[in-house]
Image (tube, helix red, strand yellow):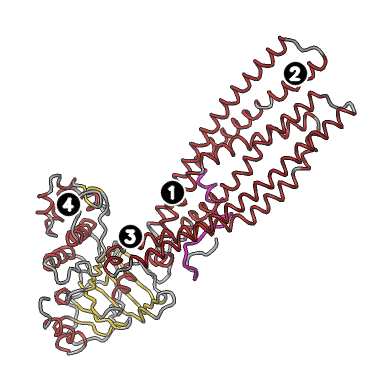
Amino acid sequence: MTNPAGTTGSALPIAGGARTWREVWRISRGHRLKLLAVAVLGVASAAVGLVTPAVIGDFVDRVQDGTAGLSTLAWATVVMIAAALAGAAGTAATIVLAGYSYHAMLAELRELLVERAMTLPQSVVERAGTGDLVSRSSDDVAQIADAAPQVIPVFTTTGFTVAVTLVGMTILDWWYGLALLVVLPVYIVTVRWYLRTAPRIYRAERAAMSVRAQQLLESQRGYATVLGFGLSEHRHRRVLQASWRVVTHTLRAQTVQNMFFGRLNVAEYLGMAAILLTGFVLIGNGQSTVGAATTAMLLFLRLFGPINQLLFVVDVLQSVLASLNRMIGVIAIPAPTSPGVTVHGTVENTTAVTGGADVEGAADPLGSTSPSVLLDGVAFRYEGGRLALDGIELTILTGERVAVVGASGAGKTTLASVIAGIHEPDAGSVTRPHRTALITQEVHVFAGTLRENLTLGAPQVTDEETHAALDATGMASMVEAMQHGLDTVVGTTGHLLTAAQAQQLALARVMLVDPELAIFDEATAEAGSTHAEMLDHAADAALRGRTGLVIAHRLSQAASCDRILVMDHGRIIEDGTHSALVAAGGVYARLWAAWESTPGR
């Protein structure tokens, strides 16, 4: 596999040919009987197609011998019509059965892609850019699906036609079959040239499409920022540049395609000349009849179309394979197996070690209990950057609520991401509960009913439990005011929720999922708004009875927690209760003093 996950390349990996075909063979496991039926029907339909040239050749010989009559013509006509009908029926059945198998396998492949994409580490997606993943799950899938009308008929009919016709010509006279050897070098050289040239051009085209998708996605997602900072012209130029790169690569692909078709025309002319010359020699030596030569030419003309179609579709097939390699590249990304991460239900008999500058009075507020989160010498750096976490030692006890504060860039969000499992540590070890939930400031409301949004992570919960979570997070009155209650459609296609309501919804989701560890990364960041107190109450309800890690946007949130961690440059520099840290007169004390003096906080 090229550019595997974990290398310095930024794009998602692209599977090699061998890996792709192994995956396709595995997916075909439940469809192999249907594929065998396709092969049998295809061969039978192609064999029936040999009847018409043979009947015409026989009729020509009868005319030449003077034995042909009206009955001979009628007999030949009936046989050819019957053969045409049988061949058409067999071909139709072959294409339908092949199309059914093709689309069933594509559907399974698409499901595997989506399933794997949903479990990719966020760091992998961030490095590649969401546009790359979106392009693979949309453009590449569409490319394969759209190619079906061209690929399926060719590979289920013309392939069999070529094979059966070559056998038929050889049976007619081996010299006719031998004559086609003149054509083979031209086809071989042409196809080899095309296969060397086209794949990299198609890969470049697909990569350019990914970049274009990324630019469009960023412009749409950052629409408010684009307008607010007057970046419309800048974003327009970026999208335009990405679009022109796609045009350039598409024109190159079209040029290669035209050169490919021109070389195929040379092979066609050589084939016809070879058959005519062979027939002339054989007839002159009495080794063949005019009817046999006619049959051979008709068979070649019958072969002429399928061979061209088979080679023409190589062009489409290269694009399909490029898309297929990109899809399999995502599916084949191995699941993270970092030895530095342990997921558990309950940790017992573990000595608690707390990093940072311990402050007197920071005793365990919960008494003797077992650790829920353990970080031992954890270090992490973003690609090409400085250490975002440096030697973190941290223990969070079961049921303890810990706040993390610090300046922007201190490492708070990175700490939350490492504990949540979004990022794997570069050094050290992380132990966390199996049921861990992370809520960030960026909350997404999915298009669907309110009930579906609330029960995404816990589809088994009852309406009573759902209403209880809504009541605890302060959403009950809003839902009661909705005409359809929990069945109200929300999101972009329905009832639009405010930012505060979306955060309430996310907090209610946490209560329904009921994780052992809840991590809030500024999950109630409505600073300065009238909703701040309401969201604080909702967050408090969501954290009640479980271990919590809160990246505090407001120091009032931190003050209500059992412990507070102060971070600076990727290190924990203070650790203690609110009162102990204020009394110590350190960094937190200064932050608290500034917070208290802020008007309208």
Q: Residue beneath label 3, please? A: 220
Q: Residue beneath label 2, please? A: 59
Q: Mark 3 and mark 1 in contact (Cβ < 8 Å)? A: no
Tell me how far mark 2 sits from mark 1, CA to CA. 53 Å
| Residue 579 placement: quadrant | bottom left
Numbered disc 3: secondary structure:
helix
Of badges 4 and 3, the one in the foreground is 3
Q: Residue beneath label 1, please? A: 110
| Sequence-earlier tag: 4 or 2 | 2
| Sequence-earlier tag: 1 or 3 | 1
Seen from the viewer's position, the closer of residues 533 and 428 is 533
Image position, residue 477 (x, y; %)? 9, 54
Q: Tag 1: residue type?
A: Arg
Does any portion of residue 342 appear in the rendered image? no
Q: Residue beneath label 4, please? A: 466
Position of residue 405 relative to residue 288, above or below, is below
Numbered disc 1: secondary structure:
helix
